[in-house]
Image: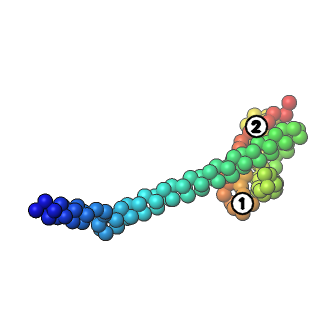
Amino acid sequence: MKNNHTSMFNRNHSSKRGFTLIEVMIALSIFAVMAAAISRTASQNADTVLYLEEKTLASFVAENRLNKLKLSGYPAATQTKDDEEMAGREWHIVTKVEDTPLPNFRRIEIQVAKMTDKENSLVSLTGFMGKY
């Protein structure tokens, strides 16, 4: 009798080992949803980093242009469009110099965009320059 009871215990115990197919499928479904969410988040983070890098470089281009204008003397009231290369990228720059209500002061607005998307500026920088 003792032998019979032990073998019955082993048979019942061995049949309860492991996971059922439905449990495995549910676990895989949960993992797939989590992996997709993590992948989407990582992709969005990469896009954000690239956008911020472009915006930072565009601000450097705008600041360089403003400093060049200030170093070249009192600018004439004009609007210019030109292109410049910086950090291995081509930039489209629109520089607008306007009179202000104050005599001997000019307002300088600089807009910088990527060459591939000239209509949408990444950065707009405004500065003022006095004649004296």
110 w.r.t. 104: above or below: below
- The amino acid sitting under disc 2 is Phe
Query: Residue 118: which numbered mark, if any?
Result: 1
Q: Is residue 47 left or right of residue 13?
A: right
Residue 99 can be seen, yes or no = no
Report helix, strand or loop for mark 1: loop
Q: Quadrant of residue 34?
A: bottom left
Report helix, strand or loop for mark 2: strand
Q: Is residue 17 left or right of residue 55?
A: left
Instruction: Please provide percent x and percent y for residue 82.
Output: 81, 56
Residue displayed at 18% across by 60% down:
6
Q: Is residue 17 left or right of residue 94?
A: left
Instruction: Please provide percent x and percent y for residue 72.
Output: 89, 40
Foreground pick, 78 / 88: 88
Foreground pick, 4 / 71: 4
Image quadrant holding the C terminus, namely top right
Residue displayed at 72% across by 48% down:
57
Foreground pick, 111 / 26: 26
41 w.r.t. 15: above or below: above
- Between disc 1 and disc 2, the foreground one is 1
Residue displayed at 67% across by 50% down:
53
Residue displayed at 81% across by 40% down:
67
Residue 118 can be seen, yes or no = yes
87 w.r.t. 36: above or below: above
Instruction: Please provide percent x and percent y for residue 76.
Output: 85, 44
Image quadrant holding the N terminus, namely bottom left
Query: Residue 71: which numbered mark, if any?
Result: none
Foreground pick, 77 / 122: 122
Q: Which residue is mark 2?
A: 128
Extreme-right residue of the structure: 72
- The amino acid sitting under disc 1 is Lys
